[in-house]
Image (cartoon, rainbow, N blue to C red):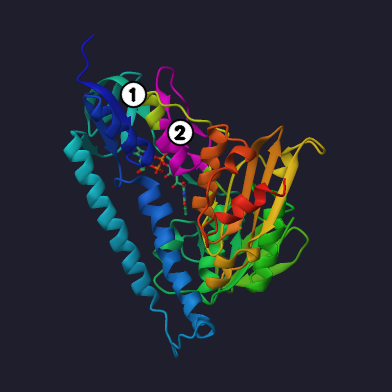
Amino acid sequence: MDYKYDVGIIGGGPAGYTLAIHACKKGLKTVLFEKDCLGGGCLNRGCIPTKSILHSAELAAELRCADELGIIVPNFEVDYAKVVERKNQVVSKLKKSLELTLKNCGTEVVFGVAEIKDKNTILAGGEEFSCKKVYVATGSSPKSFKGLEVDHKNILNSDDILNLTTLPESIIIVGSGAIGIEWARILSNFGVEVTVVEGAENLLPVADVEVSKRIERMFKLNKIKFYKSANVQKISTADGCEVTLADGKVLTAEKVLVAIGRKPNVEHKIDGVTYLGDACGEIQLAHYAIKQAIEIIDGIGFDKNLVPSVVYGTPEIAWVGKREQDLTPNTYKKSTMLISALGKSHCDNCTDGFIKILTQEDKIVGVHIISKEASPLVQQLAIAMKSGISPDKLKEVCFAHPTYSEGIFESLFNL
Ligand SMILES: Cc1cc2nc3c(=O)[nH]c(=O)nc-3n(C[C@H](O)[C@H](O)[C@H](O)COP(=O)(O)OP(=O)(O)OC[C@H]3O[C@@H](n4cnc5c(N)ncnc54)[C@H](O)[C@@H]3O)c2cc1C
Protein backbone atom coordinates (compact mmCIF):
# COMPACT_ATOMS: atom_id res chain seq x y z
CA MET A 1 0.00 0.00 0.00
CA ASP A 2 1.26 3.45 -0.94
CA TYR A 3 0.89 6.19 1.62
CA LYS A 4 1.20 9.91 0.91
CA TYR A 5 3.15 10.44 4.17
CA ASP A 6 5.47 8.27 6.21
CA VAL A 7 4.55 10.05 9.42
CA GLY A 8 1.29 11.84 10.40
CA ILE A 9 1.24 13.66 13.74
CA ILE A 10 -1.75 15.23 15.50
CA GLY A 11 -0.62 18.00 17.87
CA GLY A 12 2.17 20.56 17.54
CA GLY A 13 3.42 20.70 21.15
CA PRO A 14 6.86 19.45 22.33
CA ALA A 15 5.94 15.79 21.63
CA GLY A 16 4.56 16.48 18.15
CA TYR A 17 7.09 19.02 16.93
CA THR A 18 10.08 17.03 18.23
CA LEU A 19 8.74 13.94 16.49
CA ALA A 20 8.28 15.94 13.26
CA ILE A 21 11.74 17.52 13.33
CA HIS A 22 13.51 14.22 14.03
CA ALA A 23 11.40 12.32 11.48
CA CYS A 24 12.28 14.88 8.79
CA LYS A 25 15.97 14.63 9.72
CA LYS A 26 15.66 10.90 8.99
CA GLY A 27 14.22 11.71 5.54
CA LEU A 28 10.65 10.68 6.44
CA LYS A 29 7.84 12.58 4.70
CA THR A 30 5.98 14.18 7.60
CA VAL A 31 2.70 16.03 8.09
CA LEU A 32 1.77 17.69 11.39
CA PHE A 33 -1.72 18.91 12.35
CA GLU A 34 -2.27 21.70 14.86
CA LYS A 35 -5.69 23.09 15.75
CA ASP A 36 -4.43 26.13 17.65
CA CYS A 37 -0.83 27.34 17.94
CA LEU A 38 2.46 25.57 17.28
CA GLY A 39 4.38 24.97 20.49
CA GLY A 40 1.34 23.50 22.24
CA GLY A 41 0.57 23.94 25.91
CA CYS A 42 4.25 24.21 26.80
CA LEU A 43 4.98 27.29 24.70
CA ASN A 44 1.56 28.96 24.73
CA ARG A 45 0.02 28.18 28.13
CA GLY A 46 2.57 26.37 30.26
CA CYS A 47 6.33 26.20 30.76
CA ILE A 48 7.42 29.30 28.86
CA PRO A 49 4.74 31.91 29.69
CA THR A 50 4.76 31.04 33.40
CA LYS A 51 8.55 31.19 33.61
CA SER A 52 8.56 34.52 31.78
CA ILE A 53 6.12 36.02 34.32
CA LEU A 54 8.06 34.33 37.13
CA HIS A 55 11.23 36.12 36.02
CA SER A 56 9.50 39.51 36.48
CA ALA A 57 8.06 38.36 39.82
CA GLU A 58 11.51 37.35 41.08
CA LEU A 59 12.94 40.69 40.05
CA ALA A 60 10.17 42.44 42.00
CA ALA A 61 11.01 40.33 45.06
CA GLU A 62 14.71 41.10 44.72
CA LEU A 63 14.06 44.83 44.36
CA ARG A 64 11.96 44.75 47.50
CA CYS A 65 15.03 43.78 49.52
CA ALA A 66 17.67 45.35 47.27
CA ASP A 67 18.65 47.83 49.97
CA GLU A 68 20.07 44.90 51.97
CA LEU A 69 22.55 44.53 49.12
CA GLY A 70 23.34 48.22 48.98
CA ILE A 71 21.10 49.00 46.02
CA ILE A 72 18.52 51.67 46.78
CA VAL A 73 15.46 51.61 44.51
CA PRO A 74 12.88 53.92 46.06
CA ASN A 75 9.18 53.40 45.27
CA PHE A 76 9.47 50.93 42.44
CA GLU A 77 6.19 49.91 40.83
CA VAL A 78 4.94 46.82 39.03
CA ASP A 79 3.28 47.41 35.64
CA TYR A 80 1.62 44.01 35.37
CA ALA A 81 0.14 44.69 31.93
CA LYS A 82 3.72 45.15 30.71
CA VAL A 83 4.81 41.95 32.45
CA VAL A 84 2.12 40.13 30.46
CA GLU A 85 3.02 41.97 27.26
CA ARG A 86 6.64 40.87 27.63
CA LYS A 87 5.47 37.31 28.26
CA ASN A 88 3.49 37.48 25.00
CA GLN A 89 6.57 38.75 23.16
CA VAL A 90 8.71 35.89 24.49
CA VAL A 91 6.08 33.36 23.39
CA SER A 92 5.69 34.98 19.99
CA LYS A 93 9.47 35.08 19.36
CA LEU A 94 9.87 31.40 20.24
CA LYS A 95 6.81 30.48 18.16
CA LYS A 96 8.26 32.17 15.07
CA SER A 97 11.52 30.33 15.58
CA LEU A 98 9.67 27.00 15.89
CA GLU A 99 7.61 27.72 12.75
CA LEU A 100 10.85 28.37 10.88
CA THR A 101 12.52 25.22 12.20
CA LEU A 102 9.56 23.09 11.09
CA LYS A 103 9.50 24.77 7.69
CA ASN A 104 13.24 24.41 7.19
CA CYS A 105 13.26 20.73 8.07
CA GLY A 106 10.45 20.07 5.58
CA THR A 107 7.48 19.32 7.88
CA GLU A 108 4.16 20.03 6.20
CA VAL A 109 2.05 21.84 8.82
CA VAL A 110 -1.74 21.78 8.46
CA PHE A 111 -3.71 24.07 10.76
CA GLY A 112 -7.08 22.72 11.86
CA VAL A 113 -8.71 20.09 14.03
CA ALA A 114 -7.58 16.61 13.02
CA GLU A 115 -9.18 13.28 13.82
CA ILE A 116 -8.30 9.69 13.15
CA LYS A 117 -10.37 7.80 10.60
CA ASP A 118 -8.36 4.61 10.93
CA LYS A 119 -4.82 3.70 11.93
CA ASN A 120 -3.44 5.01 8.62
CA THR A 121 -5.78 7.89 7.86
CA ILE A 122 -6.11 11.34 9.42
CA LEU A 123 -9.06 13.61 8.59
CA ALA A 124 -8.66 17.40 8.67
CA GLY A 125 -10.46 20.22 6.90
CA GLY A 126 -12.60 17.72 4.97
CA GLU A 127 -9.50 16.04 3.50
CA GLU A 128 -8.02 12.59 4.08
CA PHE A 129 -4.28 12.21 4.71
CA SER A 130 -2.90 8.71 4.33
CA CYS A 131 0.08 8.01 6.60
CA LYS A 132 2.20 4.90 7.05
CA LYS A 133 2.28 5.65 10.78
CA VAL A 134 0.01 7.90 12.85
CA TYR A 135 1.02 9.53 16.13
CA VAL A 136 -1.24 11.33 18.59
CA ALA A 137 0.35 14.11 20.65
CA THR A 138 -2.76 16.09 21.54
CA GLY A 139 -1.62 17.07 25.03
CA SER A 140 -3.79 17.54 28.11
CA SER A 141 -6.36 19.96 29.57
CA PRO A 142 -6.96 21.26 33.10
CA LYS A 143 -9.10 18.89 35.19
CA SER A 144 -12.23 20.15 36.86
CA PHE A 145 -14.53 18.40 39.32
CA LYS A 146 -18.06 18.96 40.48
CA GLY A 147 -18.05 21.97 42.77
CA LEU A 148 -14.74 23.12 41.31
CA GLU A 149 -15.96 24.27 37.90
CA VAL A 150 -14.11 27.30 36.51
CA ASP A 151 -16.05 30.30 35.15
CA HIS A 152 -12.90 31.74 33.46
CA LYS A 153 -13.63 35.11 35.11
CA ASN A 154 -13.21 34.74 38.85
CA ILE A 155 -12.63 31.01 39.15
CA LEU A 156 -9.69 30.44 36.87
CA ASN A 157 -7.66 27.57 35.48
CA SER A 158 -3.98 27.72 34.56
CA ASP A 159 -4.84 28.99 31.05
CA ASP A 160 -7.07 31.82 32.32
CA ILE A 161 -4.59 33.13 34.87
CA LEU A 162 -2.08 33.82 32.10
CA ASN A 163 -4.53 36.24 30.52
CA LEU A 164 -5.06 38.50 33.53
CA THR A 165 -3.71 41.96 32.85
CA THR A 166 -4.19 43.25 36.37
CA LEU A 167 -3.20 41.54 39.60
CA PRO A 168 -5.92 40.54 42.07
CA GLU A 169 -5.54 41.68 45.68
CA SER A 170 -5.99 38.13 46.91
CA ILE A 171 -6.24 34.63 45.50
CA ILE A 172 -7.00 31.12 46.73
CA ILE A 173 -5.06 28.44 44.88
CA VAL A 174 -6.70 25.02 44.99
CA GLY A 175 -4.02 22.37 44.54
CA SER A 176 -0.34 22.48 45.44
CA GLY A 177 1.21 20.57 42.55
CA ALA A 178 3.97 22.23 40.53
CA ILE A 179 1.52 24.66 38.89
CA GLY A 180 -0.11 25.67 42.20
CA ILE A 181 3.24 26.17 43.95
CA GLU A 182 4.70 28.16 41.04
CA TRP A 183 1.73 30.52 40.88
CA ALA A 184 1.66 30.87 44.68
CA ARG A 185 5.25 32.10 44.59
CA ILE A 186 4.76 34.29 41.50
CA LEU A 187 1.71 36.07 42.90
CA SER A 188 3.11 36.39 46.39
CA ASN A 189 6.26 38.01 44.94
CA PHE A 190 4.00 40.56 43.25
CA GLY A 191 2.40 41.34 46.62
CA VAL A 192 -0.86 39.38 46.13
CA GLU A 193 -2.29 37.80 49.29
CA VAL A 194 -2.11 34.05 48.57
CA THR A 195 -3.82 31.09 50.25
CA VAL A 196 -3.10 27.53 49.08
CA VAL A 197 -5.56 24.71 49.73
CA GLU A 198 -4.27 21.14 49.37
CA GLY A 199 -6.34 17.98 49.77
CA ALA A 200 -3.37 15.72 50.54
CA GLU A 201 -1.57 15.69 53.88
CA ASN A 202 1.51 17.46 52.46
CA LEU A 203 2.09 20.40 50.15
CA LEU A 204 3.52 19.33 46.77
CA PRO A 205 2.49 15.74 47.51
CA VAL A 206 4.55 14.33 44.60
CA ALA A 207 7.77 15.47 46.29
CA ASP A 208 9.97 13.92 48.98
CA VAL A 209 8.31 14.51 52.33
CA GLU A 210 11.21 16.66 53.63
CA VAL A 211 10.87 18.88 50.58
CA SER A 212 7.16 19.29 51.34
CA LYS A 213 7.96 20.27 54.94
CA ARG A 214 10.52 22.81 53.78
CA ILE A 215 7.98 24.38 51.42
CA GLU A 216 5.69 24.89 54.42
CA ARG A 217 8.51 26.77 56.14
CA MET A 218 9.17 28.88 53.05
CA PHE A 219 5.46 29.66 52.70
CA LYS A 220 5.29 30.77 56.33
CA LEU A 221 8.31 33.05 55.83
CA ASN A 222 6.70 34.53 52.73
CA LYS A 223 3.29 34.90 54.41
CA ILE A 224 1.62 32.47 51.99
CA LYS A 225 -1.24 30.88 53.96
CA PHE A 226 -1.97 27.19 53.42
CA TYR A 227 -4.39 24.48 54.42
CA LYS A 228 -3.48 20.77 54.14
CA SER A 229 -5.79 17.73 54.15
CA ALA A 230 -8.42 20.26 53.17
CA ASN A 231 -10.96 19.22 50.59
CA VAL A 232 -12.86 21.91 48.77
CA GLN A 233 -16.59 21.30 48.69
CA LYS A 234 -17.69 24.22 46.62
CA ILE A 235 -16.66 27.57 45.26
CA SER A 236 -19.21 30.35 44.91
CA THR A 237 -18.87 33.82 43.46
CA ALA A 238 -21.92 35.59 44.88
CA ASP A 239 -19.83 38.10 46.82
CA GLY A 240 -16.15 37.86 45.79
CA CYS A 241 -15.01 34.21 45.73
CA GLU A 242 -15.95 31.93 48.60
CA VAL A 243 -14.27 28.56 48.96
CA THR A 244 -16.03 26.18 51.33
CA LEU A 245 -13.90 23.40 52.81
CA ALA A 246 -15.23 20.00 53.90
CA ASP A 247 -14.93 20.99 57.59
CA GLY A 248 -17.24 23.95 56.94
CA LYS A 249 -14.53 26.62 56.97
CA VAL A 250 -15.13 29.37 54.40
CA LEU A 251 -12.19 31.17 52.75
CA THR A 252 -12.65 34.33 50.72
CA ALA A 253 -10.54 36.01 48.03
CA GLU A 254 -10.90 38.10 44.89
CA LYS A 255 -10.00 35.19 42.58
CA VAL A 256 -9.57 31.43 42.76
CA LEU A 257 -7.09 29.40 40.72
CA VAL A 258 -8.04 25.75 40.32
CA ALA A 259 -4.85 23.74 39.74
CA ILE A 260 -5.84 20.16 40.49
CA GLY A 261 -4.10 18.35 37.66
CA ARG A 262 -4.57 17.71 33.96
CA LYS A 263 -6.28 15.02 31.93
CA PRO A 264 -5.06 13.62 28.57
CA ASN A 265 -6.87 14.91 25.48
CA VAL A 266 -7.65 11.41 24.27
CA GLU A 267 -11.08 9.78 24.41
CA HIS A 268 -10.08 6.26 23.45
CA LYS A 269 -6.88 4.77 22.09
CA ILE A 270 -6.87 3.15 18.66
CA ASP A 271 -4.78 0.04 17.99
CA GLY A 272 -1.83 0.66 15.70
CA VAL A 273 -1.68 4.37 16.59
CA THR A 274 1.07 5.60 18.96
CA TYR A 275 0.24 8.08 21.74
CA LEU A 276 2.94 10.24 23.28
CA GLY A 277 3.47 13.29 25.49
CA ASP A 278 0.71 14.34 27.89
CA ALA A 279 -1.80 12.50 25.68
CA CYS A 280 -0.36 9.10 26.65
CA GLY A 281 -1.28 9.65 30.31
CA GLU A 282 2.17 9.03 31.81
CA ILE A 283 4.49 11.76 33.08
CA GLN A 284 3.12 15.20 32.12
CA LEU A 285 6.34 17.09 31.51
CA ALA A 286 7.67 18.68 28.34
CA HIS A 287 11.08 16.97 28.56
CA TYR A 288 9.38 13.59 28.97
CA ALA A 289 7.35 14.28 25.82
CA ILE A 290 10.52 15.31 23.96
CA LYS A 291 12.44 12.20 25.05
CA GLN A 292 9.54 9.94 24.05
CA ALA A 293 9.55 11.48 20.56
CA ILE A 294 13.30 10.98 20.19
CA GLU A 295 13.04 7.41 21.46
CA ILE A 296 10.37 6.67 18.83
CA ILE A 297 12.24 8.13 15.87
CA ASP A 298 15.93 7.74 16.76
CA GLY A 299 15.66 4.71 19.02
CA ILE A 300 17.56 6.52 21.80
CA GLY A 301 15.94 5.21 24.96
CA PHE A 302 15.91 6.82 28.40
CA ASP A 303 15.28 5.72 31.94
CA LYS A 304 11.71 6.63 32.87
CA ASN A 305 12.62 6.41 36.56
CA LEU A 306 15.19 9.17 36.10
CA VAL A 307 13.04 12.01 34.75
CA PRO A 308 13.94 15.18 36.66
CA SER A 309 11.17 17.35 38.14
CA VAL A 310 11.59 21.06 38.74
CA VAL A 311 9.31 23.53 40.48
CA TYR A 312 10.52 26.99 39.54
CA GLY A 313 10.79 29.98 41.85
CA THR A 314 13.30 31.18 44.42
CA PRO A 315 14.76 28.92 45.58
CA GLU A 316 14.16 26.24 42.94
CA ILE A 317 12.87 22.85 44.00
CA ALA A 318 14.16 19.90 41.95
CA TRP A 319 14.50 16.17 42.30
CA VAL A 320 15.25 12.98 40.44
CA GLY A 321 14.87 9.32 41.39
CA LYS A 322 13.34 7.85 44.51
CA ARG A 323 11.84 9.76 47.42
CA GLU A 324 12.74 8.85 50.99
CA GLN A 325 9.17 7.71 51.69
CA ASP A 326 9.50 5.21 48.80
CA LEU A 327 12.44 3.42 50.45
CA THR A 328 12.28 0.70 53.10
CA PRO A 329 13.77 1.92 56.40
CA ASN A 330 17.33 0.67 57.12
CA THR A 331 17.98 -0.17 53.45
CA TYR A 332 19.43 3.20 52.48
CA LYS A 333 21.87 5.91 53.51
CA LYS A 334 21.10 9.60 53.42
CA SER A 335 23.09 12.80 53.45
CA THR A 336 21.42 16.16 53.94
CA MET A 337 23.39 19.35 53.64
CA LEU A 338 22.09 22.85 54.27
CA ILE A 339 22.57 25.34 51.47
CA SER A 340 23.53 27.93 54.09
CA ALA A 341 26.81 25.98 54.53
CA LEU A 342 27.88 27.14 51.06
CA GLY A 343 29.76 30.42 50.65
CA LYS A 344 28.06 31.11 47.32
CA SER A 345 24.59 31.08 48.92
CA HIS A 346 25.63 33.94 51.25
CA CYS A 347 27.13 35.91 48.36
CA ASP A 348 23.81 35.54 46.52
CA ASN A 349 21.68 36.26 49.60
CA CYS A 350 19.87 32.97 48.95
CA THR A 351 20.69 30.64 51.85
CA ASP A 352 17.41 28.72 52.12
CA GLY A 353 17.27 25.05 51.21
CA PHE A 354 19.15 21.76 51.27
CA ILE A 355 20.72 19.06 49.16
CA LYS A 356 19.61 15.56 50.07
CA ILE A 357 21.21 12.49 48.50
CA LEU A 358 19.86 8.97 49.01
CA THR A 359 22.00 5.90 48.28
CA GLN A 360 21.49 2.15 48.31
CA GLU A 361 24.36 -0.31 47.96
CA ASP A 362 26.76 2.39 46.86
CA LYS A 363 24.38 3.68 44.19
CA ILE A 364 22.73 7.09 44.20
CA VAL A 365 18.99 6.39 44.03
CA GLY A 366 17.45 9.77 44.74
CA VAL A 367 18.39 13.45 44.94
CA HIS A 368 16.17 16.21 46.34
CA ILE A 369 17.32 19.80 46.23
CA ILE A 370 15.90 23.13 47.31
CA SER A 371 18.35 25.83 46.28
CA LYS A 372 19.08 28.55 43.83
CA GLU A 373 20.18 26.65 40.68
CA ALA A 374 18.60 23.40 41.91
CA SER A 375 17.64 22.42 38.34
CA PRO A 376 21.19 22.22 36.92
CA LEU A 377 22.37 20.59 40.17
CA VAL A 378 19.83 17.81 39.85
CA GLN A 379 20.82 17.38 36.22
CA GLN A 380 24.43 16.70 37.28
CA LEU A 381 23.23 13.93 39.58
CA ALA A 382 20.84 12.57 36.93
CA ILE A 383 23.86 12.12 34.64
CA ALA A 384 25.77 10.34 37.44
CA MET A 385 22.80 8.11 38.24
CA LYS A 386 22.17 7.20 34.59
CA SER A 387 25.85 6.41 34.11
CA GLY A 388 26.02 4.35 37.32
CA ILE A 389 28.70 6.61 38.81
CA SER A 390 29.06 5.69 42.50
CA PRO A 391 29.39 8.33 45.25
CA ASP A 392 33.10 7.40 45.65
CA LYS A 393 33.76 7.82 41.92
CA LEU A 394 31.94 11.18 41.97
CA LYS A 395 34.30 12.32 44.75
CA GLU A 396 37.11 12.12 42.16
CA VAL A 397 35.48 14.97 40.19
CA CYS A 398 36.77 18.48 40.89
CA PHE A 399 33.89 20.89 41.67
CA ALA A 400 34.52 24.65 41.26
CA HIS A 401 34.44 27.07 44.18
CA PRO A 402 32.35 29.01 45.11
CA THR A 403 29.38 27.22 43.54
CA TYR A 404 26.24 25.40 44.60
CA SER A 405 27.56 22.20 43.03
CA GLU A 406 30.20 22.12 45.77
CA GLY A 407 27.25 21.18 47.95
CA ILE A 408 26.94 17.91 46.03
CA PHE A 409 30.62 17.20 46.58
CA GLU A 410 30.38 17.99 50.30
CA SER A 411 27.23 15.85 50.68
CA LEU A 412 29.05 12.81 49.29
CA PHE A 413 31.35 12.82 52.33
CA ASN A 414 28.39 12.60 54.73
CA LEU A 415 27.02 9.35 53.33
C1 LIG B 1 0.99 26.15 33.77
C2 LIG B 1 1.86 25.02 33.27
C3 LIG B 1 3.20 25.06 33.51
C4 LIG B 1 4.02 24.02 33.06
N1 LIG B 1 5.36 24.08 33.30
C5 LIG B 1 6.15 23.06 32.88
C6 LIG B 1 7.56 23.12 33.09
O1 LIG B 1 8.08 24.07 33.65
N2 LIG B 1 8.31 22.09 32.65
C7 LIG B 1 7.76 21.00 32.02
O2 LIG B 1 8.48 20.09 31.64
N3 LIG B 1 6.42 20.93 31.81
C8 LIG B 1 5.61 21.94 32.23
N4 LIG B 1 4.28 21.88 31.97
C9 LIG B 1 3.75 20.70 31.27
C10 LIG B 1 4.00 20.81 29.75
O3 LIG B 1 3.42 21.99 29.27
C11 LIG B 1 3.42 19.59 29.05
O4 LIG B 1 3.94 18.42 29.65
C12 LIG B 1 3.79 19.60 27.58
O5 LIG B 1 3.27 20.73 26.94
C13 LIG B 1 3.26 18.33 26.90
O6 LIG B 1 3.58 18.39 25.54
P1 LIG B 1 2.64 17.67 24.47
O7 LIG B 1 3.29 17.90 23.16
O8 LIG B 1 2.36 16.29 24.89
O9 LIG B 1 1.24 18.43 24.55
P2 LIG B 1 0.88 19.95 24.34
O10 LIG B 1 2.03 20.84 24.56
O11 LIG B 1 -0.34 20.20 25.15
O12 LIG B 1 0.49 20.05 22.80
C14 LIG B 1 -0.62 19.42 22.29
C15 LIG B 1 -1.06 20.17 21.03
O13 LIG B 1 -2.04 19.37 20.34
C16 LIG B 1 -2.99 20.25 19.75
N5 LIG B 1 -4.21 19.46 19.50
C17 LIG B 1 -5.00 18.84 20.41
N6 LIG B 1 -6.00 18.18 19.79
C18 LIG B 1 -5.84 18.40 18.45
C19 LIG B 1 -6.56 17.98 17.31
N7 LIG B 1 -7.62 17.20 17.39
N8 LIG B 1 -6.13 18.39 16.10
C20 LIG B 1 -5.02 19.18 15.98
N9 LIG B 1 -4.30 19.60 17.05
C21 LIG B 1 -4.70 19.21 18.26
C22 LIG B 1 -3.17 21.32 20.83
O14 LIG B 1 -3.72 22.49 20.27
C23 LIG B 1 -1.73 21.50 21.31
O15 LIG B 1 -1.08 22.51 20.59
C24 LIG B 1 3.44 22.92 32.38
C25 LIG B 1 2.07 22.90 32.12
C26 LIG B 1 1.28 23.94 32.57
C27 LIG B 1 -0.20 23.90 32.27
Residue shown at 23%/8% (left/top)?
1
Q: Secondary structure at mark 1?
A: strand
Q: Residue 209: image x %, image y %?
A: 72, 50
Residue shown at 59%/38% (left/top)?
393
Q: Nearer the viewer, mark 1 or mark 2?
A: 1
Residue 291 lies in magenta, yes or no? yes
Q: For the residues marked 1 and 2, what is the alpha-carbon distance in whole angstroms?
A: 14 Å
Left or right, 244 with respect to 313, comes to right
Q: Amino acid at mark 1?
A: Val
Disc on res. 134: 1
Q: Earlier in the sequence, mark 1 or mark 2?
A: 1
Residue found at the far bottom of this picture: 74
Q: What residue range appears in magenta?
A: 263-292
Q: Residue 232: image x %, image y %?
A: 68, 57
User: Is residue 272 something that shows in the picture?
Assistant: yes
Residue 196, picture quadrant: bottom right
User: Is residue 149 something that shows in the picture?
Assistant: no
- Residue highlighted by disc 2: 266
Q: Nearer the viewer, residue 163 or 7?
A: 7
Q: Nearer the viewer, residue 402 or 110?
A: 402
Q: How many neighbours does mark 1 have within 10 angstroms: few (below 14), some (14-19), or many (20 or more)?
A: many
Q: Residue 321: image x %, image y %?
A: 61, 39
Q: Amino acid at mark 2?
A: Val
Residue shown at 38%/37% (left/top)?
15
Disc on res. 108: none
Residue 181, picture quadrant: bottom right
Residue 163 lies in magenta, yes or no? no
Examine the rendered structure and indicate whether residue 72 appears above or below residue 171.
below
